[in-house]
Image (tube, rainbow, N blue to C red):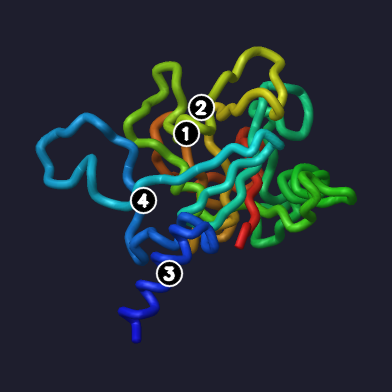
Amino acid sequence: MSRSLSKFALAAALAGLLPASALAAKGKPLRTGQTVTYGAAGDTTAGIRRSLVDNGQGWIKDQRTGLMWEKKDDSSGVHGKRRTYTWSTSGSNTASGTVFTTFLATLNTAPCFAGFCDWRLPTRFELDTITNLGEVASGAPSVDAIFDTACTTGCEIDVCSCTDTNAYWTSSTFAEDPGRAWVVLFTEGAQAEYTKTSNLQSARAVRNFR
């Protein structure tokens, strides 16, 4: 039964009836992005190849994870890569900071960004899927190249894609201390937990594409 279903999925994907992600091996993580090997088996080849598509309309689709990512730019607007936010005003589990009340509220106010009104903060594990461990903050952020393309001064999301070498908020709270939330640092692709009232973290919105 599972074998015939697999054959159907393969045929349908090749015929264009299913997305290319239907061909991806299930249950495997994505590749790290590293291209230089340091001798450990599989350090550059293990995992599923990434399949990211920039449609030129301000968002990027990940055909492997089914996530739709907001692009960032170098403007002073809501998509500006240097804009920073708080997670909470009280430092508790209450999602009352500007990342919710200003950033996401703006994206989700009709007619809504890209016509979708369900943008949210990614979880720690979701945000980690766009990191590239082959890049460090010696000029280039540790992110897949599609999130850092043609990023020139003052550019907007219809012509560029930017990522600041900064910490980005996730929706995931640090279990040991509810006053802290997990962030992904695009200086090096690491994770850490920061005080929710801190106003020094960036944000990138996501939604489920499928």
> What whole-number distance in Å separates the C-alpha atoms at marks 3 and 2?
40 Å
Left or right of 162 on screen, residue 156:
right
Give the number of the mark in front: 3 or 2.
Answer: 3
For the residue carrying disc 3, how many other residues have a C-alpha within 10 Å: few (<14), some (14-19), or many (20+)? Answer: some
Assess whether mark 1 and mark 2 are in contact (beta carbons under 8 angstroms): yes
Q: Residue at x 88, y 48 (%)?
A: 111
Residue 12 percent coordinates (x, y): 47, 66
Q: Which of labels 4 and 2 is toward the front?
A: 4
On residue 186, which mark appears? Answer: 1
Measuring 69% from the left and 29% from the top, which residue is drawn there? 157
Q: Residue at x 33, y 52 (%)?
A: 48
Q: Between tags 1 and 3, which lies in front?
A: 3
Amino acid type of the residue tagged 3 in the rendering: Ala
**Gap between marks 2 and 1, in whole Å?**
5 Å
Name the secondary structure under disc 4: loop
Residue type pointed to by label 2: Thr
Q: Secondary structure at mark 1?
A: loop
Which one is earlier in the sequence, the residue at label 4 or at label 1?
Answer: 4
Left or right placement of residue 34 versus residue 18 in this view: left
Establish if 30 lies above or below 153: below
Measuring from the top left, give residue 47's x and y in whole percent.
29, 52
Q: Earlier along the polypeptide chain: callout 4 or callout 3?
A: 3
Label annotation for residue 30: 4
Which of 109 and 150 lies nearest the eye of the viewer?
A: 150
Rendered view: 160 above or below 180: above
